[in-house]
Amino acid sequence: MSAVPVVELEPNQSPVPLILADEAESETDAKSWGLTTSIGVPSGVELSLIYRPVFWLRGSAGAAYNGVSGGGQAGAAVGYFSAPFTPTLSVEAGTFAEGSAVALGQRFGADLSSVPAARRVGYQYGSAQLGLEFGWPQRFTFRIGAGLSYAHATLHDTQATLRSLSGDTRVVAGDLTLNAVLPSLTLGCVAYLL
């Protein structure tokens, strides 16, 4: 059996702290740039560039698609992004260009071809979510979030739509503005690259 070496310290000398393997990659070694992809409501499918200037703050901006048209989004999240499990608070704003919802309706068994308002669908939204991220925080994490969104849309061709649906040609209506507070859900992943 071999002897364990004994180190004697001088009276004013402190022991050298040990660095565990888990702590070898600290917040200062964290990668700052990456990509995130997610699917959600009302944000659609997103692919964004992310930047993390400090370990607790992350910004994002990118492209999105909601099944009708393309759009874009930008957002920010706060959380302890150096832990394997971290709660997050995120905000995001996005917009989708007007597009035809007729094909999307057909995918779900609804014939919207006779609904003029379905030919010009677009919206803007703002969301706030509480979430959870889990994984390897310096490389790759999964994320899930839920919260509330404020959505704004203009319903075009309202008069033609009401006349078509009711069969009454005497109906007179202008475009309608729709504002709503809706549930917001997101499921995605984050990959830090640089």
Image: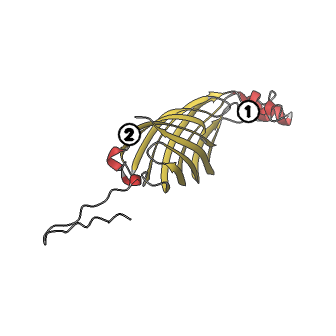
Nearest to the observer: residue 71 or residue 85: 85
The three-letter amino acid code for the residue at tag 1 is Gln
Where is residue 67 drawn, in percent x and y? 68, 32
Where is residue 80 drawn, in percent x and y? 42, 55
Quarter in which the N terminus is drawn:
bottom left
Answer with the quarter of the image where residue 68 lies. Answer: top right
Q: How is the image coloured?
A: secondary structure
What residue do we see at 81% from left, 28% from top? 114
**What residue does disc 1 label?**
159
Left of 194 or right of it: where is 172? right
The residue at the far bottom in this view is 11
What residue do we see at 31% from left, 59% from top? 18
What residue do we see at 35% from left, 63% from top? 2
What residue do we see at 50% from left, 33% from top? 62
The three-letter amino acid code for the residue at tag 2 is Ser
Nearest to the observer: residue 21 or residue 73: 21
Nearest to the observer: residue 67 or residue 15: 15
Mark 1 or mark 2: whose residue is earlier in sequence:
2
Q: Secondary structure at mark 1?
A: helix
Q: CA distance from mark 1 to mark 2?
A: 51 Å
The residue at the far right in this view is 167
Q: With respect to residue 136, does 66 lie above or below?
A: above
